[in-house]
Amino acid sequence: MSIDKKYRVPKIVAAHQRTPVWLRVGLLLLVLGGVAGLAYQQGGNGIAEGLARLQSGGKDRVTDLEMERNELKRELEMVRQAAEVDREALLAIKDQIKTMQSERLKMEEELAFLRGIVSTSSKKQVLRIQNFKLQQGLEAQQYVYKYTVSQVINSGSVVKGKIEMTITGLKGEKTVNLQLKQLSEEKLESHKMRFRYFQNVEGKLRIPTDFQPAKVKIEVKPTGSKLAPVDAAFEWSPVS
């Protein structure tokens, strides 16, 4: 019997060496971390670029809006100035029209007055009371009156005489007549009259607080027999 058959040498088989689990997991996590980091870096760069573009575009938009706002402000100021000019022009035109109307009225009054004193329809001298005006004075209960006494021009002789005034009104519930001398601030009893063509008459009245005027009566009393006395009554309607 041979030795080889009696004794067999056992085969030594090398065991297959497997990689530990923890090492494989670690490597996997390392790879994934690297991939994630790379992705984060790329994504971060994209976000930064996006933010930069957004910021740049926002600045441009703000600039555009500011330019539009300034343009609108400029146009609004132009419109406001134009409206102001139009308003001032309109007020100036209104004032001019008012002045022209006032001057026209004054000219018409003067024309009527002149026509009255140069009238040839009458063959005798005639006295007239014209253009009575009553205004409130600067002080309480003070009034200023103005009017004109004229004659129709025929002979052109000098008219002399006096002009009396009477104020009729209520004192309590009673109607009373107050003479010029009772109300005149100048202490006048009457106005002296002396003129060839016309005479302007004016004065100031001080009205008692317990007296309510209603009418003003003016009496022109020439001396001599050539001219007849004349009188006229006017409503008490002072203007301020």
Image: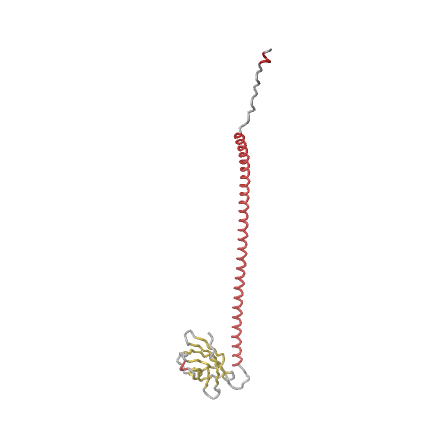
In this rendered view, identify the residue nearer to me: 159 or 5.
5
What quarter of the picture does the N terminus occupy?
A: top right
User: How far from the left and from the top, in percent, is residue 29?
Assistant: 53, 33
Q: Furthest-left residue in view? A: 187
With respect to residue 28, does 187 lie above or below?
Answer: below
Residue 90, quarter of the rendered image: bottom right
Taking the image as shown, residue 209 lies to the left or right of residue 70, namely left
Instruction: Give the left or right position of residue 102, taking residue 207 as reference.
Output: right
Q: Position of residue 73 (x, y in %)?
A: 53, 55
Q: Residue furthest top?
A: 1
Q: Is residue 218 above or below residue 93?
A: below
Question: How is the rendered protein coloured?
Answer: secondary structure
How many dots with numbers?
Answer: 0
Q: Quadrant of residue 24?
A: top right
Q: Position of residue 36 (x, y in %)?
A: 54, 36
Residue located farthest toward the bottom when viewing the structure as drawn = 225
Nearest the viewer among 209 and 122 is 209
Q: Position of residue 14 (x, y in %)?
A: 56, 21
**Vertical placement of residue 81 versus 33, above or below:** below
Is 96 or 115 nearer to us in this picture? 96
